[in-house]
């Protein structure tokens, strides 16, 4: 039996104030785009369709969005991550995906294996979050049954954290695959 479709979303709309520039423009020391790496991890895990929430430095960021990913334009990201997440959830409703795997652009070391681990037995009721020891992180997989309620509940820059906690998201340890660290500084 084939695995149900899982869409992928990269949250990449922020201005990167602590970082000093939008993280969607960042590159590894060998020149690889963080944005392309995030999309690649989702793609390599089997996510389809792929979405990228973008806003800051749009003229520079849009050319970095891989051709197989659909940009989701965020007109005013000043409200925080919730705006990007809500827009990504809305975009995903046009697909036949039963769930949405979510990552942030500032995790360039994220392996596809971490995304695949969370997609193990996913369905429309799934609510799964990667943890690294006791520390929650990305990726996160949200089943379609949660999309509307999550979109209605999120505010500010906290994203899905409170929703995941309140609804008892399954926590899957991925510390053996990578550190789970996001990059807030260069």
Image (cartoon, rainbow, N blue to C red):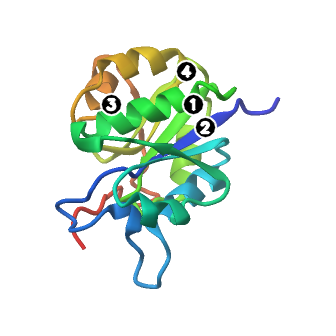
Q: Earlier in the sequence, mark 1 or mark 3?
A: 1
Question: Disc 2, disc 1: CB below 8 Å?
Answer: yes
Q: Are marks 3 and 4 in contact (CB under 8 Å)?
A: no
The residue lying at 39 percent from left, 35 percent from top is 85
Q: CA distance from mark 4 to mark 1?
A: 9 Å
> Pointer 3: residues within 10 angstroms few (<14), some, or many (20+)?
many
**Rendered image quadrant of residue 107:** bottom left
Residue at 33 percent of width and 45 percent of height: 137
- Say whether disc 4 or disc 1 marks the residue closer to the N-terminus: 1
Q: Position of residue 46 (x, y in %)?
A: 68, 47
Q: Is residue 177 above or below residue 78?
A: below
Q: Quadrant of residue 168?
A: top left
| Front residue of this view, candidates 176 and 104 | 104
Tell me the residue that label 2 is attached to.
7
Which of the two discs, 1 and 3, sits closer to the camera? Answer: 1
- In the image, residue 26 lies at what x, y percent? 38, 70
Q: CA distance from mark 2 to mark 1?
A: 7 Å
Q: Which residue is mark 4?
A: 144
């Amino acid at each position: 039996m084939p695995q149900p479709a899982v869409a992928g979303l990269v949250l990449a709309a922020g201005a990167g104030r602590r970082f000093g520039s939008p993280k969607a423009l960042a590159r590894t020391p060998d020149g690889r785009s963080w944005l392309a790496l995030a999309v690649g991890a989702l793609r390599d895990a089997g996510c389809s369709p792929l979405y990228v929430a973008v806003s800051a430095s749009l003229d520079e960021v849009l050319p970095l969005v891989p051709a197989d990913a659909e940009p989701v334009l965020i007109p005013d990201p000043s409200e925080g991550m919730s705006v990007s997440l809500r827009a990504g959830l809305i975009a995903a409703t046009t697909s036949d995906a039963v769930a949405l795997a979510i990552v942030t652009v500032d995790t360039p070391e994220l392996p596809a294996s971490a995304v695949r681990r969370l997609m193990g037995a996913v369905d429309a009721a799934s609510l799964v979050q990667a943890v690294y020891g006791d520390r929650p992180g990305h990726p996160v997989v949200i089943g379609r049954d949660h999309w509307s309620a999550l979109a209605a509940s999120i505010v500010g820059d906290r994203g899905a954290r409170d929703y995941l906690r309140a609804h008892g998201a399954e926590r899957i340890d991925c510390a053996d695959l990578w550190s789970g660290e996001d990059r807030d500084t260069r």
